[in-house]
Image: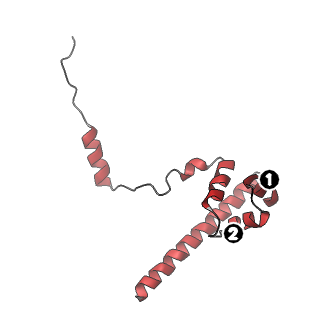
């Protein structure tokens, strides 16, 4: 039981750390565009306070706000890999073998 709780704490810490990193990247991108929090929040149609929480890595931020911010920053395509099924190398190799085909029919000559 103790190891399960410890594992959950580690996962929470990892997700918290990741959210803080993403928030910091959002802030860097906003500053690179020379935009205020107020202006960027207006573009997202949220309050400045909600936007500030995004930059701080708040876990209560709706995913739609992150996607909207990514769209504004031209980084929406970076979400394409989120939650995709990860295949091991053997599965990838088997798929390549299955796709191989021999040329059929007679050669014209």
Percent x, y of residue 63? 60, 60
Label number found at residue 82: none
Residue 72 image offset from top left, x and y in percent:
69, 49
Viewport quadrant of the C terminus: top left
Residue 59 lies left or right of residue 55; in this view the side is left
Question: Percent from the top left, x then y, of residue 17?
Answer: 58, 71
With 86 as the anchor, is 68 left or right in this view?
right
Query: Above or below — where is 68 with respect to 105?
Result: below
Q: Is the image coloured rainbow, by chain, by secondary structure, or in one colour?
A: secondary structure
108 to 16, vertically: above or below: above
Indicate the secondary structure of the residue bearing disc 2. Answer: helix
Question: Residue lying furthest bottom in this view?
Answer: 2
Check the image and report above or below for 107 versus 9: above
Q: Nearer the viewer's eye, disc 2 or disc 1?
A: 2
Q: Which residue lies at the image location 65% right of the left edge and 68% below the top edge?
A: 57
Return the residue found at the far left: 106
Q: Quadrant of residue 54?
A: bottom right
Q: Residues within 10 Å of mark 1 (few under 14, many from 20)?
A: few
Q: Residue at x 29, y 43 (%)?
A: 96
Does the image show residue 73? Answer: no
Question: Residue at label 2?
Answer: 56
Image quarter (top left, top right, bottom left or bottom right) of the N terminus: bottom left
Residue at image x 70%, y 65%?
55
Tell me which corner region of the image, top left, top right, bottom left or bottom right, holds residue 41: bottom right
The crowd level at tag 2 (other Cα within 10 Å; few <14, some 14-19, many 20+) is some
108 w.r.t. 50: above or below: above
Q: Which mark is residue 34?
A: 1
Does the rendering let one see residue 9? yes
Q: Quadrant of residue 15?
A: bottom right
């Amino acid at each position: 039981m103790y190891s399960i709780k410890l594992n959950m704490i580690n996962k929470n810490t990892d997700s918290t750390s990741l959210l803080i990193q993403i928030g910091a990247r959002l802030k860097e991108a906003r500053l690179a565009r020379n935009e205020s929090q107020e202006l960027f929040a207006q573009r997202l149609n949220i309050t400045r306070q909600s936007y500030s929480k995004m930059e701080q890595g708040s876990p209560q931020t709706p995913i739609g706000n992150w996607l909207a911010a990514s769209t504004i920053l031209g980084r929406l395509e970076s979400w394409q890999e989120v939650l995709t099924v990860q295949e091991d190398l053997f599965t990838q190799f088997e798929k390549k073998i299955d796709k191989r085909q021999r040329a059929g029919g007679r050669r014209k000559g």
